[in-house]
Image: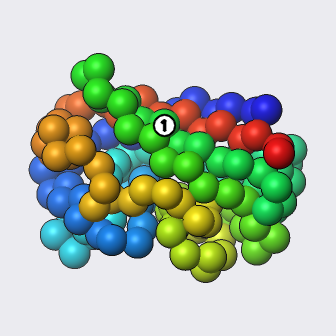
Amino acid sequence: MRTVDFQAYGHPNVISNHKTTLEITTEEKLTSRGTCIIGVRTNQTLRNLDDEIKALAKSTRTQIQLTMSVDGLVESVMGRGGPGLTYSDPISMVARTSSFECGRTVMVGADRVASDLDRRFVQKLRNPNIVIKCQLIYTRR
């Protein structure tokens, strides 16, 4: 098992109603079109993860969990790795319910996405000063 702790921040334009993805980005700006983005200004990118984690992510036998907490509220997303997860993107990490794999994909087969998050949690994400504590957990099955 390997873990990565990082943080992101809220933004007034967090909508969190996308039905197939959830995204955290290094970008500072967020428009109302970014309906899957739940956190901005993250201090972690997929590209900067170490080679051992990138190797774990390439296996369909790896379970990947993203846990996010804000003011005592916790949300988790479970998915898996895949051979096309290159973790090459320097800006965004996207959890997907589908099996689509690209440099931005942190996990496929996600059990929850932006639209599934508790609305109390989402309301807190609309504060630009709120810190979202995040953790990625990689477990080989």
Q: Position of residue 114 (x, y in %)?
A: 33, 59
Q: Residue at x 65, y 48 (%)?
A: 64
Q: Residue furthest bottom?
A: 100
For disc 1, the marked residue is 67
Determine whether 139 is above or below 3 in the image.
below
13 on left or right of 115: left
Label 1 Cα neighbours within 10 Å, binned few <14 / some 14-19 / many ≥20: some
Rendered image quadrant of residue 84: bottom right
The quadrant in which the N terminus is found is: top right
Rendered image quadrant of residue 30: bottom left
23 on left or right of 99: left
Can residue 91 be seen from the camera position used here? no
Which color mode does the image show? rainbow
Q: Residue furthest top?
A: 72
Q: Residue at x 53, y 43 (%)?
A: 66
SS at mark 1 in the image: strand
| In front of the other: 30 or 77 | 77
Q: Residue at x 43, y 56 (%)?
A: 112
25 on left or right of 141: left
Q: Position of residue 131 (x, y in %)?
A: 31, 30
| In front of the other: 102 or 81 | 81
32 on left or right of 87: left
Can residue 122 be seen from the camera position used here? yes
| In front of the other: 120 or 102 | 120
Rendered image quadrant of residue 123: top left
* Amino acid type, mark 1: Thr
Q: Residue at x 53, y 60 (%)?
A: 110
